[in-house]
Amino acid sequence: GYRCRQHFLLPRDAWTTEALAEQVRTLQVQLGRHPGYLDIQVELARCYMEQARLSWERATEECRRIIEAHPEASHVAETIDQAHSVGQAIERAAAILDKKG
């Protein structure tokens, strides 16, 4: 048989943009070698979710800096409010993947 999912898990404390990008590349190669392998597909989806979450965090941080520098930019504050619910949805989806793995 092929290696279990544990082989592909990237520890949560190692989740950086660069580490996730490298993990995605590795998983894509492995998926090419083992098409349809569930554990690889789940881990790849988990990495994509985490990339989305990290991007969301960076975007909201940038929006907060904009608001600090330009309090009159009320549309940016609105953006943060809308983005908050998106971030929560990403975190819930990623948690479901973690539980199923």
Image (spheres, rainbow, N blue to C red):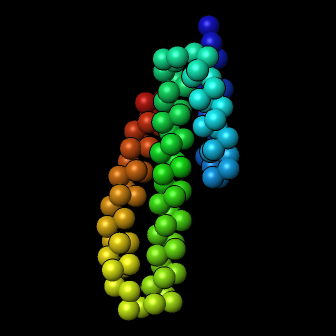
* Vertical placement of residue 63 versus 43, above or below: below
Q: Which residue reaches farthest top?
A: 1
Pick the residue in front: 60 or 4: 60
* Vertical placement of residue 13 versus 29, above or below: below
Pick the residue in front: 32 or 65: 32
- Find residue 88 and report its horizontal and vertical position in percent: 37, 56
Q: Residue at x 52, y 74 (%)?
A: 62
Pick the residue in front: 65 or 9: 65
- Find residue 44 and report its horizontal and vertical position in percent: 53, 34
- Find residue 58 and report its horizontal and vertical position in percent: 53, 65
Pick the residue in front: 9 or 20: 20
* Vertical placement of residue 41 versus 56, above or below: above
- Find residue 57 and report its horizontal and vertical position in percent: 50, 63
Q: What is the total number of numbered labels drawn onto the structure image?
A: 0
Q: Residue at x 40, y 50 (%)?
A: 90
- Classify the position of the N terminus by image quarter: top right
Task: Say left or right for 2 vs 48.
Answer: right
Q: Is residue 13 visible?
A: no
Q: Residue at x 32, y 76 (%)?
A: 78
Task: Say left or right for 46 vs 10.
Answer: left
Q: Is residue 40 visible?
A: yes
Q: Quadrant of residue 33?
A: top right
Q: Residue at x 59, y 29 (%)?
A: 28
